[in-house]
Image (cartoon, rainbow, N blue to C red):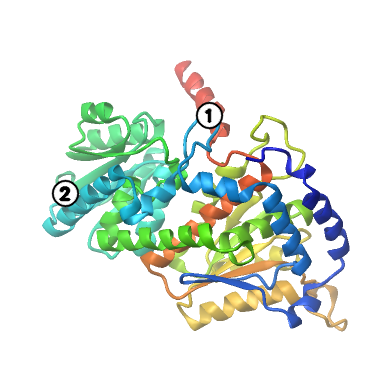
Amino acid sequence: MNTRSPTGCPAWAQLLAHAEGRRSVHLRDLLASRKLAAEAPGVRYDFSRQRVDAMTLRLLANLADERGFAEWREALLSGKPINSTEKRAAWHTALRAGESSPREVRDTLARMKALVSNIRSEKKFRRIVNLGTGGSDLGPRLLAEALGDGALEVRFAANADPRDLERALEGADPQTTLFVVVSKTFTTPETMSNAAAAKKWGGKVFYAVTSNVEAAKQFGAGETLPMWDWVGGRFSVWSAVGFAAACAMGFDAFQEFLSGAHEIDTHFAQAPLERNIPVLMALIGVWNGNFLGAATHAVLPYSNALRLLPAYLQQLEMESNGKRVDREGRPLDYPTCPVVWGMEGTVSQHSFHQLLHQGTQIVPADFIDLSLEKVLSANALAQADALAFGTDDPGLPPYKQYPGNRPSSMLLLEGLNARNLGRLIALYEHKVFTQGVIWNINSFDQWGVELGKALAGEILSRR
């Protein structure tokens, strides 16, 4: 597989030259004569407001080919050890492959189904409290908030600050509270301190999701569900890490969530590059960041239920691709992951859209329109058009002028449900992987978080 620097690819040099010739072209002049979109099951990706043309897309596709994208994709989907620094696979797609999933995955899903069904039918527990952090918190928290049906009260504690757990336990009864402790090693400091505090509070029943079964048993976990080395934390919501979310939404909905993601896996594996949504998302992101100089990227879901999605994607993208060396350990001389940020619309319009429209930096944006309400769709479309077109009225004073020419894409799905949320998250997962291939970095390790943890431990040991 190609592990050379992307800057040595002919397409990279061609894109640099192409970008110079496109800087003076305004989206106002491009949009009237084109429709750029791609479709996958349940999803339409409209990128007509991006500063690309047919030549841009051809050169970006050439870059993907020169980077050996097809071979890397096959390695990902077949479970080869593409996480080179940890000598592991990154086989999260196997978690949602249905009958094609490994036996251990299918067995775990069957156990989850039985446990979730009993918890929801017996009504022994009134509250589920998920104790995890990072990927063991953000994914299930997003699912539970977006799709919880109210049958159970599910809360989350992730912070070492005791107030986080206190909020999760407000109004709870130790006799009717189930704690789910999620930690691959069963040593994560934030998680284990919260688990110990939950015991001290009077917690009676603990389940564990971990690879350290013996430590979980010693802690007193009554049920233990597995985590596997070939699944990274930020890609693990499809596994037993999503147990608390499955309790919140029901197991049938959780399986729909898996099925939606599997549909995108199939699309990613089979669709040609020019119609492959996650590949297009990735390549357009590379174009904006490496050739047009954008340093940040906004995610704007027009849905209150998806208000946690930007935070989820921050970890998915920045922990995966926020790297300074390539796969061979060579320092990079080109940007990789942008800073990812955002907020739900329409609230964001009264927060930071001023900067998007009239600030000095260009911020590409993803608008996510679920067609939930006419007013939401209208606002999403209006914001995207205003960013693209701006104003062209010389009679307006400068402070009322909108320069426009600010790129954005729209992801359109029909409604918020488990299948659509699975589709949406899987799109971003494959985007992250594709960009890692282009940039020649390992998207599946996260050594940058280790030093701070080690130093904190040393500081605490001296106090």
Q: Residues within 10 Å of mark 1 (few under 14, many from 20)?
A: few
Q: Residues within 10 Å of mark 2 (few under 14, many from 20)?
A: some
Measure the C-alpha gap from mark 1 to mark 2. Answer: 37 Å
Rendered residue at 18%/56% (across/down): 117
Q: Amino acid at mark 1?
A: Glu
Residue 69 in the image: above or below residue 210? below
Rendered residue at 18%/58% (across/down): 120
Point out the frontmost of discs 1 and 2: 1
Q: Label for residue 425?
A: none
Rendered residue at 32%/36% (across/down): 210
Q: Amino acid at mark 2?
A: Thr
Q: Nearer the viewer, residue 361 or 288?
A: 288
Quadrant assignment, res 230: top left
SS for tag 1? Answer: helix
Q: Which residue is mark 1?
A: 450
Q: Nearer the viewer, residue 146 or 106?
A: 106
Q: Position of residue 166 (x, y in %)?
A: 32, 44
Q: Position of residue 453 (x, y in %)?
A: 50, 28
Rendered residue at 88%/63% (across/down): 21
Q: Are marks 1 and 2 in contact (CB under 8 Å)?
A: no
Image quadrant holding the N terminus, namely top right
Instruction: Answer left or right for 64 relative to 110.
Output: right
Residue 132 in the image: above or below residue 258? above
Residue 202 in the image: above or below residue 302? above
Instruction: Answer left or right for 120 relative to 87.
Output: left
Let me know if residue 249 appears in the view: yes
Quadrant assignment, res 357: bottom right
SS for tag 2? Answer: helix
Disc with the residue nearer the chain's start (1 vs 2): 2
Q: Which residue is mark 2?
A: 176
Let me know if residue 169 appears in the view: no
Q: Nearer the viewer, residue 299 or 98?
A: 98
